[in-house]
Every structure is written in structure tokens, then in C-alpha cells.
Amino acid sequence: MVDEPSRIVVKLDDLLHAQRMTLTELAERVDITLANLSILKTGKAKAIRFSTLEAICRELRCQPGDLLGYAGETS
Amino acid sequence: MLSKASDPLLRWTRLLLVIALIIFGVSGVAALVALLPLWLFEARVLVWLSAHSDGPLVARDALFSIGFTLIGIAVINGLSAQFLRKLIAIIDSVGQGSPFIPQNVDHLRVMGWLALATQAMGLVGLPLGAWLRHALANKHIFVPFSLAGLVTALLLFILARVFEHGTRLSEDVEGTV
């Protein structure tokens, strides 16, 4: 079974750039492994926990909508 | 919680299954080897069978039946050995801490088909055994009939579905950050 690529876009890279923060630094602040954050950043994650979302939003001072976007057609 | 690698249940079950696998293998080969004297000493076997049955015609049929029975035993033992190999592979994956993998779904499905095939072989052996019992007037020839194989096959197919679902859930958990 081949999974279709997700249309959810993770804009972690942009947010990190805006906050002048590295992925390693964010990983330490939110207490998530660098490997897991890297999976999220590259769009390979299948799901995100509310606790992870909350921690990232807290550290990057953003809203969940700033982190996630939808790349498909909207009706 | 017990460490999976040192879980005595897994360790002992694996050991018992390996012993059973060896027994099935050896007895399967023995059944095939037993065909050889039937073929080499056919005349002498026929004389003996004639003396213990209703005559030469019945003796010849009995000889063929014994040959088919031995081949059947070898085939059933081969199927059972394959079944055990799959089960050992599943036990190994449980020991490694990752039972919900696509390979185990395939193992369980194949085990289901093997159980069905073994049951089918048993059904073929049933009339053959009954005939031999009658022809040789031998009460020791006994072919047990049981639907346990069919129930086992159904159970394995259901279990394969459960593992398929478990594998999907496991992949979801692995992809969750």
C-alpha cells in the first residue's frame, strides 16, 4: 500500500527563520528529540500531538495556523 | 514488566516449536523413505498383505493405499513444518518488540491457508483410512476426524485482520510527533 503525500504543509522552517532559532535549540526547549522535530519539519510526520503543537507555539510565539497550512484546493 | 527477550513463555514456546519442527521434518522424511521398501520389496509386501486381507486384488489396493498414506503423511508434515516456521518467525518478532509488522500479517494468512490445506488432506485421508481398516481388518488403523483445523484456519484469518489493523495503528504511532 502506497500512502499519498499529505497536503498539510508544515511551515516550521519559516517560523524558525523568523525567530532566528535553530532546530536543535527548539528541540531542547520543547523537549522533543531532534529526530522527531526533523520528521515534522520535512513533512514526513503522519500526526502531531496537541502537546507538541502547544510547546512549539509557546516557544515560537505563534498560532497553530502559522505552523500548519493546507496545500490542496479549497472550495 | 518482563524483558521480551528474557520472557520465559516466549523462550520455552520457541524451544518446543523448534523440537516439534525437527520431529515433523524427520517423520516426514521417514514417511518418504518408508516408500522405498514398498517399492523395492513390492512382491513380498503383496504376499504379506494377501495373507492379511481378502486376497491379492485387495492386497494391491491396500499397497497403493499405504503408499498414498505415506505420501499424505509426508505432505501433512511438510505443511505442519511450514506452519511452525511461520509461528516461530512471529514469536521472534514478539521477542524483538515489534509484532505489528506487515510480515506477520502475511505469516498469519499463510498459516491460515496451511491449516486449511492440512484439514483438506485429513478429509482425503478419512475414507482411505476407513477403507484400509476394513480391507486389512486392522483396528489399529485410525484416522481421527476433527474440525479443529478449520476453526484454527478461521481464527488465523481473523488474527491476520487484527494484525493488519494493529500494523496500521503502529505505523500511525511511529509517524506521530
Image (tube, coloured by chain):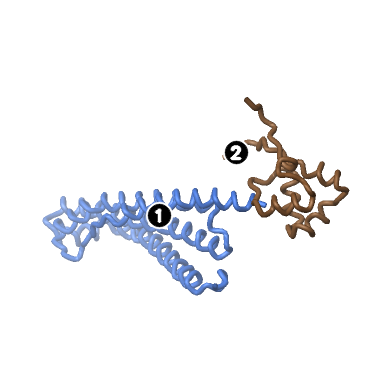
Q: Is residue A16 rendered to the left or right of residue B158?
A: right
Q: Residue at x 65, y 37 (%)?
A: A6
Q: Position of residue A28 (x, y in %)?
A: 79, 59
B151 over B92 or under it: above or below: above
Q: Which residue is mark 2?
A: A2
Q: Residues within 10 Å of mark 1 (few under 14, many from 20)?
A: many
**Image-quadrant location for residue B44:** bottom left
Residue, far top: A75
Picture colour for chain B: blue
**Image-quadrant location for residue B23:** bottom left
| Chain on which label 1 sits | B
Q: Classify the position of the N terminus of chain B by image quarter.
A: bottom right
Q: Position of residue B126 (x, y in %)?
A: 23, 53
Disc ID at residue B79: 1
Q: Residue at x 16, y 59 (%)?
A: B136
Q: Is residue B164 rendered to the left or right of residue A27?
A: left
Q: Residues within 10 Å of mark 2 (few under 14, many from 20)?
A: few
- State which mark lies toward you, 1 or 2: 2
**Image-quadrant location for residue A7:** top right
Please report contact status of discs 1 and 2: CB closer than 8 Å, yes or no.
no
Q: Indicate the chain coloured brown by its letter.
A: A
Report the front residue among B147 and A28: A28
Q: Is residue B23 rendered to the left or right of residue B176?
A: left
The amino acid at mark 1 is Leu
Label 1 element class: helix
Please tell me if label 1 and label 2 are on a single chain. no
Q: Residue at x 26, y 50 (%)?
A: B123
User: CA–CA distance between discs 1 and 2?
Assistant: 32 Å
Q: Position of residue A21 (x, y in %)?
A: 86, 51
Q: Position of residue A45 (x, y in %)?
A: 67, 46
The amino acid at mark 2 is Val
| Chain on which label 2 sits | A
